[in-house]
Image (spheres, rainbow, N blue to C red):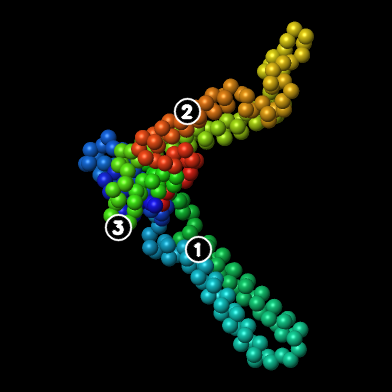
């Protein structure tokens, strides 16, 4: 389970109104680590809404709900006063009054969404720090150890968490690079306008016919045999093996199944 309280090297930083667990660089002294955490919290403080801003964020929905409830109550009162005997007449009146109430509620919500305090306000972006790094969700459960009110004896050391997070980050970066490279190669190999001479990549023999695995493959099939893709796949394999070996060393049993994931909170 995720950590339940902070401990040396494992801290919680509020970012964008979420509590995100971070690991601190173990090479820092206690004073340096404390200063790094303080600076990281200060840099991300603008991303968190104040109590007033949180209340104002709920205002449009609450007002729209109150107006809609009032419209429903008004419809019931009007229907009782009219005392219509015919069902079609009741339905017609209810539909008209309900439509008016819905429009009024929607208008109230839209007007409040465009209120002056919401205009031209640039949302602050979350800041990153090389010394205080978020713990991915795939590592968060292991980093918390046994959980509970007290940190269990099986809770890993912050230095081990730092090493695992660094290895997972490398794997995540390679995964992202793989997708970006795939997009680049898709346009380069699949769009004839982007390749002035597509025959340059083909290997022609003495008979004048192309040879090799790429000759009969479609552009999409040739993505996987591109030298850059092959090199990146090899790098991903090495990173996975290193993470698996590190997991065996520090007791991170889930290393073999780690996939790049979001930050844990």
Q: Nearer the viewer, mark 3 or mark 1?
A: 3
For residue 81, the mark is none
Would residue 211 appear left or right of 172 to someone viewing this image?
right
Q: Mark 3: which secondary structure?
A: loop
For residue 238, the mark is 2
Residue 65 horizontal/vertical position (percent): 54, 72
Among numbered discs 3 and 1, the one appearing first in the sequence: 1
The residue singled out by tag 3 in the image is: 149
**Measured Cα–Cα span from mark 3 to mark 2:** 38 Å
Q: Residue at x 65, y 91 (%)?
A: 81
Q: Nearer the viewer, residue 245 or 262?
A: 245
Marks 2/1 in contact by CB < 8 Å: the verdict is no
Marks 3/1 in contact by CB < 8 Å: the verdict is no
Would residue 253 appear left or right of 153 to someone viewing this image?
right
Residue 179 horizontal/vertical position (percent): 57, 35
**Measured Cα–Cα span from mark 2 to mark 1:** 54 Å
Q: Nearer the viewer, mark 2 or mark 1?
A: 2
- The quarter holding residue 198 reads top right
Q: Mark 2: which secondary structure?
A: helix
Residue 174 horizontal/vertical position (percent): 50, 32
Q: Relative to 66, is 123 above or below?
A: above
**Measured Cα–Cα span from mark 3 to mark 1:** 44 Å
Q: Residue at x 21, y 41 (%)?
A: 31
Can the viewer see residue 101 in this picture? Answer: yes
Q: Residue at x 58, y 26 (%)?
A: 229
């Amino acid at each position: 389970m995720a950590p339940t309280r902070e401990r040396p090297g494992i801290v919680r930083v509020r970012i964008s109104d979420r509590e995100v667990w971070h690991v601190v660089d173990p090479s820092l002294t206690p004073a340096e680590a404390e200063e790094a955490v303080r600076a990281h919290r200060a840099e991300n403080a603008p991303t968190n809404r104040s109590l007033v801003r949180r209340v104002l964020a709920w205002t449009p929905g609450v007002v729209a709900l109150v107006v809609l409830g009032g419209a429903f109550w008004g419809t019931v009162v009007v229907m009782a006063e009219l005392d219509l005997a015919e069902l079609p007449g009741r339905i017609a009146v209810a539909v008209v009054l309900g439509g008016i109430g819905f429009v009024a509620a929607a208008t109230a919500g839209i007007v409040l969404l465009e209120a002056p305090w919401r205009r031209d306000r640039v949302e602050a972006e979350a800041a990153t720090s090389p010394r205080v790094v978020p713990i991915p969700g795939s590592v968060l459960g292991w980093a918390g150890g046994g959980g509970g009110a007290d940190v269990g004896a099986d809770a890993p050391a912050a230095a081990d968490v730092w090493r695992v997070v660094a290895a997972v980050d490398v794997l995540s970066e390679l995964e992202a690079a793989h997708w970006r490279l795939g997009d680049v190669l898709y346009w380069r190999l699949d769009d004839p306008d982007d390749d002035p001479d597509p025959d340059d990549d083909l290997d022609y023999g003495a008979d004048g016919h192309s040879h090799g695995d790429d000759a009969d493959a479609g552009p999409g099939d040739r993505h996987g045999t591109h030298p850059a893709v092959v090199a990146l796949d090899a790098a991903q394999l090495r990173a996975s093996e290193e993470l698996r070996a590190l997991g065996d060393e520090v007791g991170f049993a889930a290393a073999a199944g780690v996939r790049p994931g979001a930050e844990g909170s």
